Image (cartoon, rainbow, N blue to C red):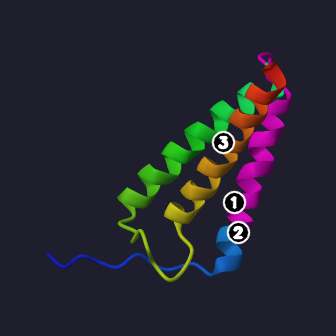
Amino acid sequence: MPTEKPAELPAARVLLRFLLRMAILVAFATFDGIGFGRSLAALLWMTTILCAVLAVLRRERVFAASLNHWDEMIGYTALCCAVMGLIQQAGN
């Protein structure tokens, strides 16, 4: 059974998908009761896991020449770490 290579999306479409997800996450975090920073960090962490699962299911290459779910996962992880750092700084 031959394995099919996943279709590569243009970088602009992947960036648009990233920004759309970020807008949705920020909107949900705004209306959460535990605070914007903590809820945004939790949502970013869940989105990181979602991107990793989608990348595995789509059999995307980790170090591909084009953008894919693995690259989005790295972006969400970096943002999650930044938000967690800001939360810790605000707590001190």
Q: What residue does disc 1 label?
A: 18
Region of the chain picked out in magenta, as a range: 16-34
Q: Quick one: label 3, few (<14), some, or many (20+) residues within 10 Å? A: many
Q: 85 and 58: which one is in front?
A: 85
Figure check: 92 above or below 60: above
Q: Given the image, on which type of amino acid does mark 3 rest?
A: Cys
Q: 91 and 12: which one is in front?
A: 91
Q: What residue does disc 3 label?
A: 80
Looking at the rendered image, the disc whose residue lies closer to the viewer, 3 or 2, is: 3
- Toward the top, the furthest residue is 33
Dominant SS of magenta comes to: helix
At 59% across and 44% down in the image, what residue appears? 47
Question: Decide: marks 1, 2 in contact (CB < 8 A)?
Answer: yes
Identify the element where label 3 is drawn: helix
Q: What residue does disc 2 label?
A: 15
Q: Which mark is residue 74?
A: none
Q: 16 and 73: which one is in front?
A: 73
Q: Quick one: label 2, few (<14), some, or many (20+) residues within 10 Å? A: some
Identify the element where label 2 is drawn: helix
Residue 87 position in % (x across, y down): 76, 28
Q: Given the image, on which type of amino acid does mark 1 rest?
A: Phe
At 39% across and 72% down in the image, what residue appears? 61
Mark 3 or mark 2: which comes first in sequence? Answer: 2
Quarter of image, res 19: bottom right
Q: In screen coordinates, is 48 left or right of 86?
A: left
